[in-house]
Image (tube, rainbow, N blue to C red):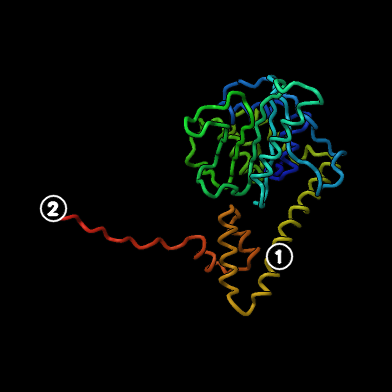
C-alpha cells in the first residue's frame, strides 16, 4: 500500500476538499481551532475537488474553502515553496473571501468571519521558532478584540515541528505525523488513533485513485519538479555570471537563505551544487565566543 504525499498541493485538496472529505475537514478544524472539542459539527465544502474541472494545472486553485454551520468561512491552503509576497496574498484572499459574501445592496451585518489557514511545507515566518501561529484582530494598547469577528490567520509550518517533543495526547499530533510522514508508511499505523486522520489516510491511498486522478497526480508532481528546476536554472545563471569572482561565497549566501526558508539540506545541495562540507558551515555556524564578564568590585 502506498499513500499520497499530503503535502502535495493536489493531494491536499483531494484529502481535505473532495466530496468525501467532510468528516476529515471537521476533525481537522476541531483539533486545530478548538483543541479537539467537537464545536464544529457540519461543513459545506465549496467547489469540491473534481478531476474533470482541473484542466490547466498552472492556473488551478488547489485551496479548500468551506462554510461552517454558523455561516463563518474557512479557507485552507497548502504552500509548497517560499515565495515573495505570500503573507500579503493570504491577507488578500481573506479580504476577498469576506467581500464575496455580499451581493449588491446587501446589509453589512450579514458579513461572517473568515479564517485563513496555511499549512506550509516550508518556513514562511523565519522571525519566530513557533510552528503554529494564530493571528487575530486586537486593539494594540489594551489587547482587546475587535467588536465583531473579522479575519483570523493561522500558519502551520511543518519544518519547525519536532514530533518527538510533542505529547501524543496533543489533538494535532496525529495530523502532523500524517502530514510529515504519510509517504513513509506502507500500512495504516495502529498508533494513529484519531478517526478523522484514519479517514484521511484512506483518502490518501494511491490504490483508491481513478485513472484520471492518477494522471493528474503525475502531472502535478512534474509541475512541482519544474518549479524547482526553474530555481535551479536561475541559480546556475547567477553562478555563471559570477564565475570569476566570489562564486563560492555567493552560493553559500544563497544556501543560507534557502535553509532559512525551510528547504531541506538535500534540496539545497541539489540546487546550489555546494560541497557537503561547505553546506555544513552554513547550516551550523560557529557560536560567537563568549566575552568574560568582569566581576564587580565589592563595596
Give the residue at mark 1.
Answer: 234
Give the residue at mark 2.
Answer: 298
In depth, the one of 295 and 98 nearer the eye is 98
Task: Answer with left or right where residue 235 lies relative to residue 56.
Answer: left
Q: Quadrant of residue 239?
A: bottom right
Q: Earlier in the sequence, mark 1 or mark 2?
A: 1
Tell me, yes or no, if residue 2 can be seen here: no
Tell me, yes or no, if residue 154 can be seen here: yes
Q: Position of residue 275 (x, y in %)?
A: 57, 69
Asked if residue 45 is positioned above or below residue 123 in the image, the reply reads: above
In depth, the one of 255 and 269 nearer the eye is 255
Q: What secondary structure is found at the residue carrying circle 2?
A: loop
Q: Residue at x 59, y 40 (%)?
A: 156
Q: Quadrant of residue 257?
A: bottom right
In depth, the one of 169 and 117 nearer the eye is 117
- Residue 170 is tagged as none
Mark 1 or mark 2: which is in front?
Answer: 2
Amino acid at each position: 500500500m502506498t499513500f499520497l504525499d499530503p503535502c502535495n498541493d493536489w493531494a491536499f485538496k483531494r484529502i481535505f476538499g473532495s466530496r468525501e472529505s467532510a468528516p476529515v475537514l471537521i476533525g481537522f478544524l476541531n483539533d486545530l481551532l478548538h483543541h479537539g472539542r467537537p464545536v464544529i459539527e457540519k461543513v459545506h465544502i465549496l467547489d469540491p475537488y473534481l478531476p474533470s474541472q482541473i484542466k490547466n494545472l498552472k492556473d488551478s486553485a488547489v485551496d479548500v474553502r468551506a462554510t461552517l454551520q454558523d455561516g463563518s468561512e474557512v479557507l485552507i491552503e497548502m504552500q509548497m515553496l517560499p515565495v515573495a509576497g505570500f503573507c500579503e496574498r493570504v491577507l488578500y484572499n481573506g479580504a476577498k473571501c469576506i467581500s464575496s459574501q455580499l451581493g449588491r445592496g446587501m446589509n453589512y451585518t450579514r458579513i461572517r468571519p473568515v479564517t485563513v489557514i496555511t499549512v506550509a511545507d516550508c518556513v514562511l515566518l523565519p522571525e519566530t521558532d513557533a510552528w503554529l501561529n494564530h493571528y487575530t484582530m486586537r486593539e494594540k494598547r489594551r489587547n482587546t478584540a475587535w467588536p465583531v469577528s473579522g479575519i483570523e490567520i493561522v500558519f502551520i509550518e511543518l519544518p519547525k515541528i519536532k514530533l518527538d517533543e510533542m505529547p501524543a495526547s496533543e489533538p494535532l499530533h496525529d495530523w502532523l505525523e500524517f502530514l510529515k510522514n504519510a509517504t513513509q508508511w506502507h500500512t495504516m499505523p495502529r498508533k494513529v488513533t484519531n478517526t478523522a486522520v484514519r479517514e484521511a489516510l484512506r483518502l490518501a491511498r494511491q490504490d483508491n485513485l481513478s485513472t484520471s486522478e492518477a494522471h493528474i497526480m503525475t502531472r502535478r508532481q512534474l509541475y512541482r519538479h519544474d518549479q524547482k528546476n526553474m530555481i535551479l536554472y536561475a541559480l546556475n545563471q547567477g553562478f555563471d555570471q559570477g564565475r570569476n569572482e566570489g562564486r563560492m561565497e555567493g552560493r553559500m549566501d544563497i544556501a543560507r537563505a534557502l535553509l532559512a526558508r525551510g528547504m531541506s539540506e538535500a534540496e539545497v545541495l541539489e540546487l546550489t551544487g555546494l560541497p557537503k562540507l561547505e553546506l555544513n558551515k552554513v547550516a551550523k555556524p560557529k557560536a560567537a565566543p563568549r566575552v568574560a564578564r568582569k566581576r564587580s568590585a565589592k563595596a
